[in-house]
Amino acid sequence: MKSYRMQDMTFAEVKEYLKNNKTIIIPYALSEQHGTHLPLDVDIRNCNFVSAKLAEKLNCITAPTLNYTFSGGMLPGTINVKPNTFSNLVGEIIESLALQGFENFIIVPGHGGSESLLHLKESLRILKWLNPTLKETMILLCQIWDFSPSWTELFAQHDYHAAWAETSLLLHWCPEVVRMDKLTVMDEPEVAERLREDPDSYQLRESFTEMKQEVVQTSQRADVKIGVMGFPEKANAAFGAKIEKEFLDNAVPAIKQALAAAEEARKTGKRIVQPDNVKMKINAI
């Protein structure tokens, strides 16, 4: 193919592509604070670079990147879109592409926000539940870190947002946008340590009562001025290259196997019945 990006193709080229390939990658991310040393579009760069490499390896195309989702952060430059709005938009994108003939959707998040990820996966499950025309579609939510042991190992070292991994990836992909000289500007030590111990501790959750039935009021804690959650000073381009290589080495064969399994299942009609081992979920609400 001349290009792996759908936006570079004509409608006639997409029509020709669909004769032999029903797979498309959907990258998504957002504009969000990443400390004083990284640009706001770190997550967008994450999914764009990875999706381009993945498309080349899988010989498939990528949809235009969806640049809006939910962060929860409230520092300037962060653009929040409610999880339900974001999830509905992704669902409608999939429905639109499915009408054209696409069957395999590989969603690549550049942003790791748990609220958006959890909401998206459940929303897409319900979308397939209520729209029988999507029964033959396969939707994969492929987070970069899931396929990189080096990245997930950093979680055990309390390194998360705008830190070792993300800074290393940008030093590998586009070092010209990284301002390592700005790392002198950080949150107060006790705040930085709290964020490393619990990355969700940037949130202030308040309520009138102790009742589990009450919906809490959430905001960003006033003492979070920078929001780096980890050790960006340890970053280097070689580590970023290692994360990229691990992702491709692990994700590509896994996705190829999934694509083959889905194609076989469509032919035979056989499905894997997934057990639901969580009983009486209503009690946890």
Image (tube, rainbow, N blue to C red):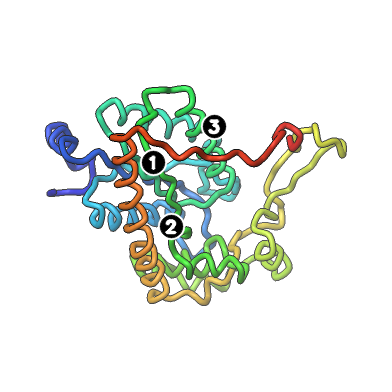
What kind of residue is marked 3?
A: Asn
Q: Residue sitting at 51 percent across and 29 percent down?
A: 126
User: Measured from the top left, where is residue 8 in percent x and y?
Assistant: 19, 42
Q: Which residue does the numbered mark 2 point to in the structure image?
A: 144
For marks 3 and 1, the one nearer the N-term is 1
Q: Is residue 235 above or below residue 125?
A: below
| Foreground residue among 185 and 81 | 81
Q: Which residue does the numbered mark 3 point to in the structure image?
A: 84
Q: Which residue does the numbered mark 1 point to in the structure image?
A: 66
Quadrant where the image shows the C terminus: top right
| Foreground residue among 43 and 33 | 43
| Foreground residue among 126 and 70 | 126
Q: Residue sitting at 58 percent across and 67 percent down?
A: 159
Separation of marks 1 and 2 at Cα, in angstroms:
16 Å
Whether residue 237 sits left or right of residue 149 in the image: it is: left
Query: Mark 3 against mark 2, which lies toward the viewer?
Result: 2
Q: Choose top left, top right, bottom left or bottom right for residue 54.
A: bottom left
Q: Choose top left, top right, bottom left or bottom right for residue 241.
A: bottom left
For marks 3 and 2, the one nearer the N-term is 3
What kind of residue is marked 1?
A: Leu
The local crowd at label 1, few if under 14, some if 14 to 19, many if 20 or more residues have their Cα within 10 Å, is some
The secondary element bearing badge 2 is classed as helix
Which label sits on residue 282?
none
Separation of marks 3 and 2 at Cα, in angstroms:
23 Å
